[in-house]
Amino acid sequence: MLARVTFTVLSFICILTVSAQEISKYDTKVYGYFSLGNGIAGGAGLDLFDSVYNQSKIRTPVFSLGADYMIKPQFSIGFIAAYQKINVSVSDSFANFLEEGNVNRVYIGFRGLWHYGKKDNVDIYSGFKLGTVTFSTGTISGPNAGKSILERENNRTRYSLGFIPIGARFLITKDFAAHIQMSLGAPTFLSAGLNYKLQ
């Protein structure tokens, strides 16, 4: 798990270092952002097709923090960190309660964006993202908690490649903006948030 997260972070640092010379040629803009998104809790829970178990999930929104560095007027690279909590309740096929607990989903990754169709107050973009998704369980309760299926199925890390078909950043003031974005792959499907110009 740690090796995959470390690899992702080091890859981002390498890309930023290689791009440093290009960055210095432009009036660089750095946008920090916070967003809330609708995460598809894929992979969390039992994820079994032919099973004697039933499950229900209650998800929080996906909370994301990140920053985008404008390497060129048409291209930026950025860092993303996101968190979502999924509460899962498990019962058997006879509706007998077995266990309940939280599954934490943490995403760490980076993204590259191509900016096009720019106007004075609107920045439209598309791009890709690469990161790691880590699932971990919190406290498990219930009669089956001692041999928890949730713990067995939800303590792992995997790579995630995603695409951003379209997103838009709307300038509110000189330093503040709002964005809305659609994406395929972790950590969100649809998200919206606020941006602040750091540089």
Image (tube, rainbow, N blue to C red):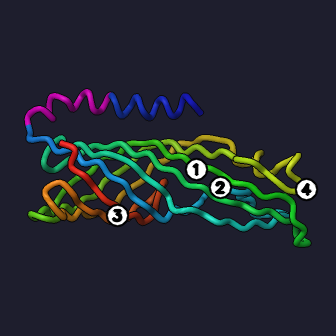
Q: Is residue 10 above or below residue 171?
A: above
Asked if the stretch drawn in magenta spans residue 84, the answer is no
**Residue at (17, 42) in percent of width and height:** 199
Q: Residue furthest bottom?
A: 94
Mark nearer the viewer, 4 or 1: 4
Distance from the alpha carbon under mark 2 to that under mark 3: 23 Å
Give yes or no for contact between labels 3 and 1 (Cβ–Cβ under 8 Å).
no
Residue 72, x across and y down, in percent: 14, 44
The residue carrying mark 3 is 181
- Residue 44 shows which numbered tag? 2
Residue 132, x across and y down, in percent: 51, 42
Check disc 2 and give the amino acid type: Ala
The first of marks 2 and 3 along the sequence is: 2
The span picked out in magenta is 14-25
Main secondary structure of the magenta stretch: helix
Identify the secondary structure beneath mark 2. loop
**Residue at (91, 72) in percent of width and height:** 94
Check disc 1 and give the amino acid type: Arg
Mark nearer the viewer, 2 or 1: 1
175 left or right, relative to 51: left
80 left or right, relative to 143: left
168 left or right, relative to 175: right
Asked if the stretch drawn in magenta spans residue 15, the answer is yes
Distance from the alpha carbon under mark 4 to that under mark 2: 21 Å
The residue carrying mark 4 is 143
Q: Is residue 164 above or below residue 161?
A: below
The residue carrying mark 1 is 105
